[in-house]
Image (tube, rainbow, N blue to C red):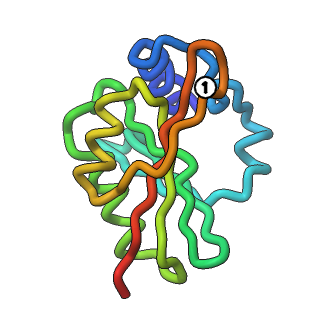
Amino acid sequence: MNVQILSYKTEVILIGSDEIPLLKDTIDTLLQCREIFYGYFVDDELSGVISIKIENDVMDIHRLFVHPKHFRKGIAQILLDFIQVNEEGFKQIIVSTGSQNTPAIRFYQKNGFSIIKEIKVADHLSLTFFLKEICI
């Protein structure tokens, strides 16, 4: 929970809005979300997390965040690569991020994701949605 809050508070600065739903999570909402979580540790400290759901051949990345003190160390890439190699039963991957989160947008595009739509969800917040087709 602490790593998630620290990471998404950094995104608040990037996107100019604190309307990120994941900032409103509690321990209870995390325990009930039915996502599969994977963590990355540096010296026994949780430093990055990715969470997914797979339904109907689609992997949905719900969360991908890194502790701010571990930014630019390749942890997000390691986590994304891990789920693509170790999970099965999907032909597509979907994910979204704040439309003003330029580093995340570049990251997903660099990894073969294409922008499929952008939706305004609040006065100062829009989300960009991505899709990646998996060749089997």
In the picture, the quarter occupied by the C terminus is bottom left
Residue visible at 40% across and 71% down in the picture: 133
Can you identify the residue that label 1 sits on? 20
Residue at far bottom of view = 136
Q: Is residue 26 above or below residue 38?
A: above
Q: Is residue 11 above or below residue 46?
A: above
Residue visible at 28% across and 56% down in the picture: 78
Q: Is residue 102 above or below residue 37?
A: above
Residue visible at 48% across and 39% down in the picture: 128
- Which residue is nearer to you in this view: 80 or 48? 80
- Which residue is nearer to you in this view: 3 or 65? 65
In the picture, the quarter occupied by the N terminus is top right
- Kind of element beneath mark 1: loop
Residue visible at 66% across and 20% down in the picture: 122
In the image: residue 61, left or right of residue 40: right
In the image: residue 13, left or right of residue 32: left
Kind of residue at badge 1: Ile
| Image-quadrant location for residue 85 | bottom left
Total numbered labels placed on residues in the image: 1
Residue 29 % position (x, y): 77, 40
Q: Residues within 10 Å of mark 1 (few under 14, many from 20)?
A: some
Residue 125 % position (x, y): 57, 21
In the image: residue 23, left or right of residue 47: right
Residue 108 % position (x, y): 33, 48
| Image-quadrant location for residue 28 | top right
Q: Is residue 100 above or below residue 82?
A: above
